[in-house]
Image (cartoon, helix red, strand yellow):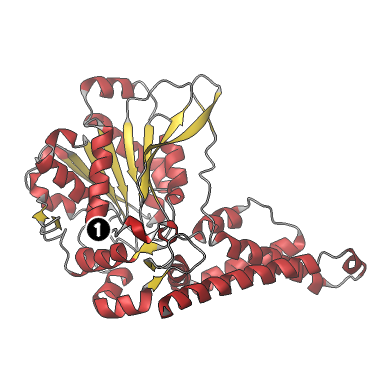
Amino acid sequence: MRYMAIYDMMETVRNTQQWLGATARTMASYPAFAMLPVPAIQWMAAWGEVTERSFERMVVKPDWGIRTFTCEDGRDHLVDIRTVIERPFGDLIHFDVSGREEQPRKILLVAPMSGHYATLLRSTVRSLITNCEVYVTDWHNARDIPVSAGKFDVEDYTLYLADFMRELGPDTHVIAVCQPAPLTLAATAYLAEEEPDAQPRTLTLIGGPIDPDATPTEVTDFGARVTMGQLEEMMIQRVGFKYAGVGRRVYPGLLQLTSFISMNADRHSAAFTEQITRVARGEASDHDAHNRFYDEYLAVMDMPAEFYLSTVERIFKTREIARNVFTVNGKKVDIGKITSVAVKTVEGSNDDISAPGQCVAALDLLTGLPDSKKASHLEPGAGHYGIFAGKSWRNNIRPLVLKFIDQNSAPKAAAAANTNVA
């Protein structure tokens, strides 16, 4: 119960900060205060507005915000987000552009389950639906999943991905971003042995820790220093009474957010101080750069404890994927069994989360795949976020990935894709 009490205490602190912000903003907005030319009152209102918004966003799942899309016919088409497969821990969703012909490129975008929602890939999705049919793994917040749904660890994650690939069929092109890269590689190898006809045509791994030891970072160093017992004691709590997942063991999103912010505390502190100043001067807006970024960054989700702990132990500590000894349901998943799926890795030279060398290590594991079906790209000057959602992705990496997809597509699909502008 003490872990449940801590979880509820963290939520109480968050809720109190939100209430304090709302109170300060409301009090400073009394008409009577307008008669007093005191800058402190304006600053209090600004502090309250920024504080209330920030702490409120921590428990709200962001909206995709992709409602319409302008196609080549010059008309705006509605985008319908349709659930293809519904599961307790995550769904497979499709961004269906109404009234548009089905696009020849079918892409499964595997989103991370690493503290943020799949909406973190919003700009990636926007860039791909231009001329692709885009499917995304939409992982659920563990606090909302009843204990009766059971556990969810790296093996369950791998089986979910295998089911999603099986559902979409062999003409699918999979793009895995960051954390899911090693497990997406494992899911592909699992299908290669269990159901070869269900394998995707291509697999693109972007900034993922295939071999965390290839180039150590602060993230890998932390995983090496801390024992699993220490990690479980420090990070794992039970969901409190407020949510449907009451009693479920999780790595709380609020605790994750604390870790995220502490890594760059000075930068975040300066950003919020500047935003308060802008609000006080009337220079801020609801969708300015600060709010666009932090509305997403502060929205965190709880991870199932089994998934978090098994990821640290099996992916980072014992390096089961890197050593090709990963198992699912007691059976080894041999990455060397992949013989027909074209694989491309993408890394950023300035990536401080999955440093260069960690992702490209996947190509050495593909012993059964001819070199003609292997490719890699190192983006100069790009950080972690930039390689899948920033300027580097839009200007250079996306065209390279689509070219790789077209080169390894079925002849008819490739010809149709080449008629569209990449």
Residue 89 drawn above or below residue 399: below
Residue 395: x percent and y percent? Answer: 41, 41
For image coordinates 62% across by 72% down, the residue present is 17
Q: Quick check: can you spot residue 307? A: yes
Where is the C terminus found, in terms of image quarters? top left
* Secondary element at image label 1: helix
Q: Is residue 226 visible?
A: no
Q: Is residue 340 above or below residue 295?
A: above
Q: Residue at x 85, y 73 (%)?
A: 38
Neighbourhood count class around disc 1 (C-alpha, 10 Å): few under 14, some 14–19, many 20 upward: many
Residue 411, image x and y in percent?
21, 21
Q: Position of residue 199 (x, y in %)?
A: 18, 37
Residue under pointer 1:
154
Disc tally is 1
Q: Residue at x 46, y 67 (%)?
A: 257
Kind of residue sitting beneath label 1:
Val
Q: Where, quadrant-wise, is the N terminus in this rendering? A: bottom left
Question: Looking at the rendering, which quadrant does residue 230 occupy?
Answer: bottom left
